Image (spheres, rainbow, N blue to C red):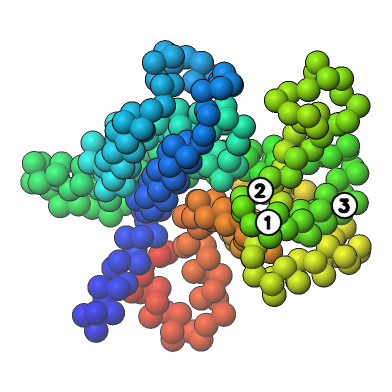
Amino acid sequence: MKVINKVIKLIKVLIKNPLSILRFLLAILFTKKLVGYIYFIEEIKNNSQYPLSKTWFTSLLPNSMFNLDVHFLYQLKLVVIIVGLLAAVGIIGRLSLFLLSLLSFYILGIVEGIGVFDHHLSLPSQVILILTFIPGTLKLSVDNFIHSLFKNKKIVITDTPKWSVNLILAVVVLTYFTAGVSKLRYGNGLNWLDGSTLSFYLKEQTLKYKEGQMQLIIGDNKISEENKWKDSIGFKAHAYGNFQLSKKRNAIATYIANNKTLVILLSIGSVLFELLGFIVFINSKYRNLYLISAILFHLSIGALMGISFRQYRLICLCLIDWKSLFNSISALLPTPILSKLKTNLQLN
């Protein structure tokens, strides 16, 4: 019984502190991705041949911060790792989170300037910044533990302020909404819904090349020679294809892509899903339905295309209203079990 009581107590702590859990796990995953991108920058050859295209953030920085030699990048890796770990465990928590967000704007700005925009980190970088300022982020942290020792007070488990969670929810919803609008805007209006774009991404297997990590280059042979950029093919844009290497999963993706009705339904469904995210603010049931759908949405993309969106899934998981979900599930249980669970968890 003691073990069960400890498990129940742990569950209560996790349910009441979603933003602290999010801070810990997201900071670790985020730091890992940033370090990976520093290695990516290191591996680029002849990176001084062309001027780096700058984002709004990197344009504010001095040119000395773009002398990307090996020694500088090594130091940058150490700084990112240290700041990321401090943010994760909550040591000088808010400052560490703020520095981690600034480092992400800097590193991802360089990567974007090279020509790669990573959608995986667009939402997480904003969430890290928001976690810097909202209450509830450091309830489970070294900072809070030390503060309680100095004040000689016991750490009290209280609910996370609702507006803190809602602020992150709003950013999540806006991210999905803009993705839906982008599909319609750059997909020639409703033409995106005909399934051809989704079919293209499902079937195109760029990693079958020996080099791996190859991109699909989109060119225009009608462009005049003087307007061609760095190449002889009239480079206009690039896109990533399917990164899934499993033959079985590729077979499923190909089947979906070749089924016109199914791929149209999935295209329409994905756009509707992205545009209707504001239902999370109607009530907890709609919120949970949408967030669970988002997790399944990204799991299916990962299974069929090899793109995990792991950070997105983590954010959605932490934003689920677990009290409401528990009540919905417990309503299906026999009364004696239900009463005992409610007594132990005290979720009402």
Q: CA distance from mark 3 to mark 1?
A: 23 Å
Question: What residue is drawn where x is 87% and y is 23%?
Answer: 223
Tell me which corner region of the image, top left, top right, bottom left or bottom right, holds residue 75. top left
Taking the image as drawn, is residue 12 in sight? yes
Disc number at residue 196? 3
Q: Which residue is mark 2?
A: 214
Q: Is residue 195 left or right of residue 348?
A: right
Locate residue 58, reporting x and y percent.
49, 20
SS at circle 1:
loop
Taking the image as drawn, is residue 305 in sight? no
Q: CA distance from mark 2 to mark 3?
A: 21 Å
Amino acid tagged 1: Tyr
Q: Which residue is mark 1?
A: 209
Q: CA distance from mark 2 to mark 1?
A: 7 Å
Q: Quadrant of the N terminus?
A: bottom left
Locate residue 280, reporting x and y percent.
62, 49
User: Quick check: 128 above or below 141?
Assistant: above
Amino acid tagged 2: Met
